[in-house]
Amino acid sequence: MALDDIKRVLAAEASLADVAAAHTRALDGQIRTLRLQRAVLGTVARSTDPRELERMTDLATADRRANAAASSRTTSTQRSKPRRNPDVGQP
């Protein structure tokens, strides 16, 4: 977790569960991208057909863009919804 996220939890602007869920979604996207990159590299290692390599590159680029867009939507959604943190007591 980033320091900003920890500060938001401590300031009761976001719950720990919400921040953890956002990070989980981001990790899921990164894992998906890594799996795709691994598959592309495996195909490149076995194939020298330029058309096949171009298709793999296009797929990897499209997936990377989709993950970046999903990640930015998650971050802006999390920061635009201030919430009270039920885990933090009132003074």
Image (cartoon, helix red, strand yellow):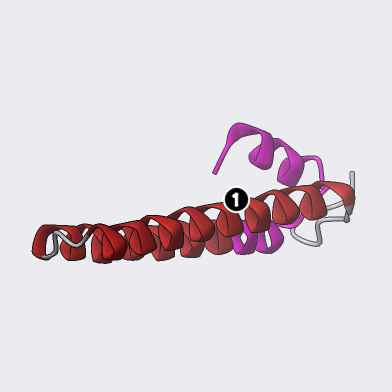
Q: Main secondary structure of the magenta part?
A: helix
Side of 86 relative to 20 (left or right): right
Q: Residue visible at 67% across and 34% down?
A: 4
Q: Tell me where residue 83 appears, x and y as whole percent.
A: 88, 55
- Circle 1 sits on which residue? 68
Q: Tell me where residue 36 appears, x and y as whole percent.
A: 35, 64
Q: Quadrant of the N terminus?
A: top right
| Amino acid type at mark 1 | Ala
Single out the residue that lies furthest toward the left: 46
57 or 3: which is nearer to us? Answer: 57
Q: In this view of the protein, can residue 82 be seen by the observer?
A: no
Q: Residue visible at 66% across and 63% down?
A: 17
Q: Tell me where residue 11 appears, x and y as whole percent.
A: 80, 40
Circle 1 — which element?
helix
Q: Residue visible at 62% across and 64% down?
A: 21
Residue 56 sits inside the magenta stretch: no
Q: Quadrant of the C terminus?
A: top right
Q: In this view of the protein, can residue 31 be seen by the observer?
A: yes
Q: Tell me where residue 42 appears, x and y as whole percent.
A: 17, 63
Side of 87 relative to 53 (left or right): right
Residue 5 sits inside the magenta stretch: yes
Q: Is residue 64 above or below residue 6?
A: below
Q: Residues within 10 Å of mark 1 (few under 14, many from 20)?
A: some
Q: Is residue 25 above or below residue 80?
A: below
Single out the residue that lies furthest toward the top: 3
What count of labels does the image hold?
Answer: 1
Q: Residue visible at 70% across and 61% down?
A: 18
**Stretch of the chain drawn in magenta:** 1-23
Determine the image quadrant of residue 24: bottom right
20 or 69: which is nearer to us? Answer: 69
